[in-house]
Amino acid sequence: MSSPSRPAAKLPGTPQEVLEHVFGYRSFRGQQEAIIRALLDGRDALVLMPTGGGKSLCYQIPALLRAGTGIVISPLIALMQDQVEALRQLGVRAAFLNSTLSTVEAAEIERALLDGALDLLYVAPERLLTARFLDLLQRARIALFAIDEAHCVSQWGHDFRPEYRRLDVLHQRWPEVPRIALTATADTRTREEIVERLGLEDAQRFVSSFDRPNLFYRVEAKHDGTRQLLGFLQRHRGASGIVYCLSRKGVEDTARRLREAGIEALPYHAGLDAAQRSGHQRRFLREDGIVMVATIAFGMGIDKPDVRFVAHLNLPRSIEGYYQETGRAGRDGEPAEVWLCHGLQDVVLLSQMIQQGEAGEERKRVERSRLEALLGFAESTRCRRELLLGAFGEPFAGPCGRCDNCVEPPATWDATEAARQALSCVYRSGQRFGVTHLIDILRGHASERVRQHGHERLSTFGIGKAMDAARWRTLFRQLLAAGMLEVDPEGHRGLRLAAAARSLLRGEARFEARLEAHGSQRARGVKHRPDTGMAAASDPEVQARFERLREARARLARAQNVPAYVIFHDATLRAIAKSRPASLQQLAGISGVGDAKLERYGAAMLEALAGK
Ligand code: ADP
Ligand code: ZN
C-alpha cells in the first residue's frame, strides 16, 4: 500500500478548495455542502442519502479541515483497506485499525493518531468499544466521529450489529465532538431507531431524495429463471454485476450454470468458509467483469462504483431490502440496470420461511405485510419508480421513462370471471391446497390427488379448461399480490381466501390482470436496451482511446496491488478519452482528477491518450 504523503499539517482553505484540489470535483452535490458546514460548526448530523449519493465526502472534507483526526466507524473490516487506499491515492493521510493488522502495524498507527498525523482513521465497532481503544482516543485529538452504515443499529434489518447499539458511549464521553451518522436506508422506522439509539435527537437532519435516476428498473415473471437470467446477462457482457438468490443451493447452481455459459461468475454465501468468501469478494472488487452470485449475506458496504447490474432471481423479502440491494448498482452515476425475476414459488417459500422462523407473532405479521407490499410492487402495472419512492413516503409522479412499465406499458385483461372461478375453487376445496392442485381442478384434470379428495365432483371442476395452466398460475400470483389470497400461515403450501376476496366474490368489484406474454419480446426483454455504458462510446476513436486508458490504469493498479477504480473511475477515463486534454493543466480540469492524482498519474494518462 502506498504511504501517506502529505506533510503533517491540516489543509488550509475552504470546503470548495478541498473538493477541487483533493477530490478533483468542481461542485458539491445535493446537500453535501450544508452537511459539511454543520460539522464544521460543531453540530451533529444525521444523513439519509441513497447509495452513490456521495456520503463519504460529507465527513471526509470536515475531517480534513478540522483539527484532529476523523474517526470513522465502519462495520466491514474487509472493505476498510480499499476505502483507505482510495483516500491515500488522493494524498489524504488515512489508515485503518482492525484485526488484519499485526501488533507492530497497529502500534504504528496508534502512534500516528496520537501524533496528530492522521486525517482519517477507520475502525470497526468491536475495536472502538474496547476499554483500551477508548483510552487511546481520550489521549488523541478528534475532529469528528462518523458512524457509517448507521442502520446497523436496527434490530429489524438484516444488517443488525449489536455493537452499534453501544455507540452512544461516544456522545457521553466526547459531548463536544461532532458526530455524523450516515445511512442509505430509506425506511422511516429505521431512521427513528438510529436517532433514538445513537442519541441524535439534536442532530440536524439531512434527507435526500432516494431516487436513483441512473437505474433502470425491470421486473419479469419467472418461467425458466436461469434461461431468463442468461438472456438478461447478454446485454451486460463483460460488466461487473451481482445476482441475488434466496438459498445457498440456488447460489451454487446458478453460479455453475453461468460459468458453463462462459461467464466469470463466483458464488458467495454464508456456507462458504471465510477465506473463500473474502477471496471471492476481493476478486469481485479488483477485477473487471466478475459476476457475483450471492445470498443477501453479500453486499453491505460494497463501494465498488462500477457495478452495472443487480439481478434478483428470487423475490426479496421486502421493498426496503429490494431498494438496498438494487442500490448497489451504478454508484458512479453511470447507467445501470436492475432486474427482478420472480415466481409463485418464491411467495410460497418466503411465506413459509417467515412462518417457520423464530420471530414472535408481531414480527411475523410485519414481515408478512412487507412481503405483500413487495409482491404488489412486482405485479403492478404502474411506474416502478413512483411505487418504490412512494413506499418510502417520497412523492414522485411517474411516468419516469426509465422502468419497464413506463417504456413498454403492460397490457391488461378483464380477469374478473376467471378470478372468481379461482377464488371459488380455493374455497370449495377447503382452503388448504396449493396452486398445482387448484389448477388441476379448474382445468378438469382428474389427477390421483384430485380423485383421492373427491375434487372431481366439485362444481368448479373443469370450469377453467379454456385457459392454460401457465396463465392460471400467473393469475394466482396476481391474486396473492392483490391481497385476495394468502399462503396458509400454518406452513403448508395451501392458499386460502384473504380479506380483499370478499368484494370480488360478491360481484361488487372487477379484476384487471396484467397480461403476460410468455416468451414474447417483453419477457425476453430485448426491446428496450438501457445503455449501461459498456458500449457507451459510439465513436470508435473515443472507444479506442478509452481502452488504452483502461489498460494504462490496469497496469498502474497492478503495480500497487490496488483496485483499478481507486486510480480513476471509468467516468473519468471516459471524460479524458472524449475531451483529449493536451496538457497536464487541461487534464486537471477533468472531474475526478485532483492534485495528487494529477501528479502521480497525469503523465501516464497523457501518454496512453497519445497511444505511446
Ligand atoms: P455513498 O457512500 O453515498 O454511496 P460515495 O461517497 O461512495 O457514495 O460517492 C459515490 C461516488 O460519487 C463516488 O465515486 C464519489 O467519488 C462521487 N462523488 C461524491 N461527491 C461528488 C461530487 N460532489 N462531484 C462528483 N463526484 C462526487
Ligand atoms: Zn417508470
Image (cartoon, rainbow, N blue to C red):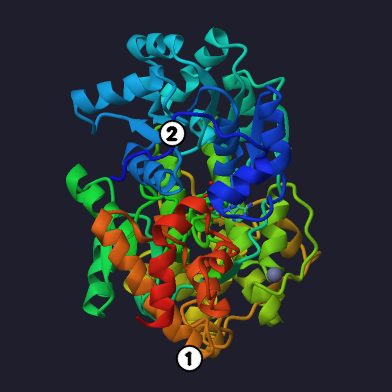
Where is residue 565 shown, x and y percent of the image? 41, 59
Mark on residue 312?
none
Q: Residues within 10 Å of mark 2 (few under 14, many from 20)?
A: few
Residue drawn at 35 percent across, 53 percent down: 295
Q: Residues within 10 Å of mark 1 (few under 14, many from 20)?
A: few
Res 19 seen here = yes
The foreground one among 221 and 29 is 29
Position above or below: 101 against 398 = above
Which type of secondary structure does the marked residue at label 1 adopt?
helix
Residue type pointed to by label 2: Pro
Position above or below: 4 against 264 = above
Distance from label 1 to label 2 (Cα)?
44 Å
Res 287 seen here = no
Q: Earlier in the sequence, mark 1 or mark 2?
A: 2
Quadrant showing the C terminus = bottom left
Check disc 2 and report the residue beneath it. 7
Where is residue 35 shown, x and y percent of the image? 69, 36
Q: Name which quarter of the figure residue 599 lies in.
A: bottom left
Residue type pointed to by label 1: Pro
